[in-house]
Structure formats: structure tokens, C-alpha cells
Image (cartoon, rainbow, N blue to C red):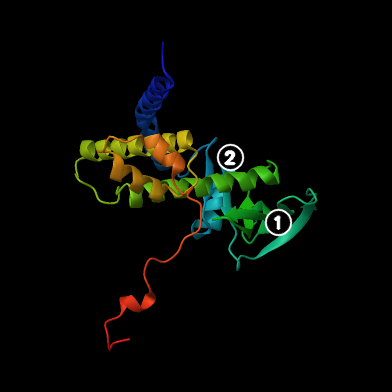
Amino acid sequence: MKTRGMNHFESLCTLLLLAIASIAAVIAAPIQLKLDTAKTGAPISPYIYIMDRGYVDLDHFAVLSERGVFWVTRMKENLKSDRIDCRPVKRGGPVVSDETIMLNNGVLARRIVAWVEVDGEERSMTFLTNQEWSAETIVELYRCRWEIEVFFKQMKQTLKLCDLMSYDANGIRWQVWIALVVLMTMRYLAWLSQWGHSFVRLYALVRSLVWEQRDLLSILRRYGTATGSYRNLAQPEQAYFPGFA
């Protein structure tokens, strides 16, 4: 008879194996994209470019549109354009406006203004795209891009992937694989324990307990749930030397 803990263990092993098996495809995809770009001058469809506004290049957008490549980006504040028409939007939804515009180089695009939640706060953002999907889908695509940015931040800063332990291609692959395995493990523990705090705090707590024989899930579930009243065990004056207060 399998226990619940064994089911969790088997599920974790399955997730880790799937993660390792998919790494080759994840790493190979940008390589193939680079080959396509080198051959044709721009990626071919059905690629979707989701870029930050720092990559806004009108000539590049024109080339992408000619080749049938869809792109989504944020609009720069000083980017000039002419409005062609307006599209209806849902009242009370996150999308404020949806317009068809013409850029300075003659490229037709959509300008979508919407409220997007970033770090727990609602912010007004303006998007540009040549895609005909719904405005809500365009906003969700860019939100997913932000999740990818968070993923790379966790990989580089928390899992220390910014410091390479080897300059050999195979050594770099192994370091990336191990970091992804650790990330998957942390995510799985967060899901099991219904973790409601930051990823950095989870990683620090697990790292401090990994070599101790403790019920890790029980600790994660109880973390941050202390209640009751508190009082200072010392007086503030005790922190000063006599005569220096």
C-alpha cells in the first residue's frame, strides 16, 4: 500500500525527470531560431516576439510583419503615430482602450492601454502588437513574459546561476540542469505546503534545514503562522553604554 508521502516522492521524481528531459528542447529552440534568423534575416512564422520597450525598432517591426511574425511590446512614450480607428472594449475590464494606429514608417499596429498588476500594484501600460487576438490575450501574453523575467531573476540571483563554475559547454549545461532541478524542487515544495511567502525566503529556509532530520513540510506549513501578543524582554536604554546615551 502506497503512502501519501511516497506518492509525493514519485510525483517529484516524475517532475524532475520531465524537467531534465525537456532541457534539450528548451536549449535547442533558441539555437534553431538563430539559424532561421541567419538564413532569412528575420524569424519565420509561427514565432511570437514578446519584447520590452527597450527593443522597439520600427524597421524591425516592418520586417517581422512582412514575414508573418507576430510581435508584442510596450510602447515608448515619445513614439509618434496616427490613429486609424477604435475597437470596442469591455466596460469595467482591465483594458482601457484598443486602437488601430499607423506608425511613422507606415506599419499598421494595435495600441492597447490596460491595467496590469505588477508586484501587487495596478499599473497602466500601453502595448503595441500586430496580432489580431483579443486585447485581454495580448495583455496576458506580456504578463507571461514578466513571469519569465521573474524566473530568470530567481535562477541568476537566488540559485547563483550568474557565476559559472565552468566555461566548458558541457559544464555550463550541467550547472543549468542542476539549477532547474533545484527550482522545480522548490516549486513543488511550495505547492505542497501552500507557501505564501517569497521564493528567496523558501530557498533560505530549505537550505538551512536540508541536512537536518526534520519534517520539512510541517515546518513550511507552520511558517509565519505564529499568533499572540508580544512584549520586549529588554528596555531600549540597555542598548546604550552609560554616559553615551
Q: Is residue 6 visible?
A: yes
Query: In the rendered structure, which amino acid carries the disc numbered 2?
Result: Gly
Image vertical order of residue 97 relative to residue 240, above or below: above
Horizontal placement of 128 versus 230: left or right? right
Query: What is the C-alpha distance between the residues marked 2 and 1?
Result: 18 Å
Which residue is at 68% across, 45% downward? 136
The foreground one among 75 and 237 is 237
Decide if residue 61 is on the left or right side of residue 190: right
Amino acid under label 1? Answer: Ile
67 relative to 103, above or below: above
Which residue: 38% across, 66% down? Answer: 233
Rendered residue at 43%/34% (across/down): 188
Which numbered disc, 2 or 1, marks the residue that appears first in the sequence? 2
Q: Badge 1 local density, few (<14 within 10 Å), some, or many (20+)? A: many
Please report the residue visible at 36 percent of the width from the left and 32 percent of the height from the top: 23
Q: Which residue is mark 1?
A: 101
Asked which quadrant contains residue 26, the reply is: top left
Give coordinates of residue 128: x percent, y percent.
Answer: 62, 53
Neighbourhood count class around disc 2 (C-alpha, 10 Å): few under 14, some 14–19, many 20 upward? some
Query: What x and y, as percent, mark residue 140?
Result: 61, 45
* Residue at numbered disc 2: 68
Image location (x, y in percent) of residue 110? 68, 51
